[in-house]
């Protein structure tokens, strides 16, 4: 699954994102609106982790979504 699919179906994936990164608020998720770069930025801010680690987590998230759908 690629990120375009996630972005296009953001409302369905918001719950999975919230489950993965619980510190993100519903307002955060609404503002992100499926944009990968904005998600990465919010994760960095909320969790205080490096960009490389965030990218790794997002790639793993994408793979898990593929397995579910």
Image (spheres, grey):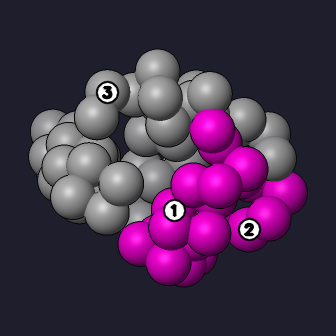
Contact (Cβ within 8 Å) of mark 2 with mark 1: no
Residue in the picture at 57% in, 55% down:
13
In this rendering, position of residue 36 left or right of residue 54: right
Residue 10, x across and y down, in percent: 65, 42
Residue in the picture at 65% in, 55% down:
12
The magenta region covers 9-29
Q: CA distance from mark 3 to mark 1?
A: 15 Å
Q: Residues within 10 Å of mark 3 (few under 14, many from 20)?
A: few
In depth, the one of 57 and 16 nearer the eye is 16
Q: Is residue 50 visible?
A: no
Residue 69, x across and y down, in percent: 36, 54
Of label 3 and label 2, which has the lower sequence position?
3
Secondary-structure class at tag 1: helix
Q: Badge 3 is on which residue?
A: 2
Q: Is residue 38 above or below residue 64?
A: above
Q: Badge 2 is on which residue?
A: 25
Residue in the picture at 84% in, 57% down:
27
In depth, the one of 39 and 17 nearer the eye is 17
Magenta segment main secondary structure: helix
Q: How many marks?
A: 3
Contact (Cβ within 8 Å) of mark 3 with mark 2: no
């Amino acid at each position: 699954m690629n990120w375009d699919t996630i972005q296009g179906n953001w409302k369905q994936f918001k719950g999975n994102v919230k489950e993965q990164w619980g510190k993100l608020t519903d307002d955060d998720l609404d503002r992100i609106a499926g944009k990968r770069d904005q998600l990465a930025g919010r994760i960095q801010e909320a969790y205080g982790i490096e960009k490389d680690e965030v990218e790794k987590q997002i790639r793993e998230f994408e793979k898990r979504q593929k397995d579910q759908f």
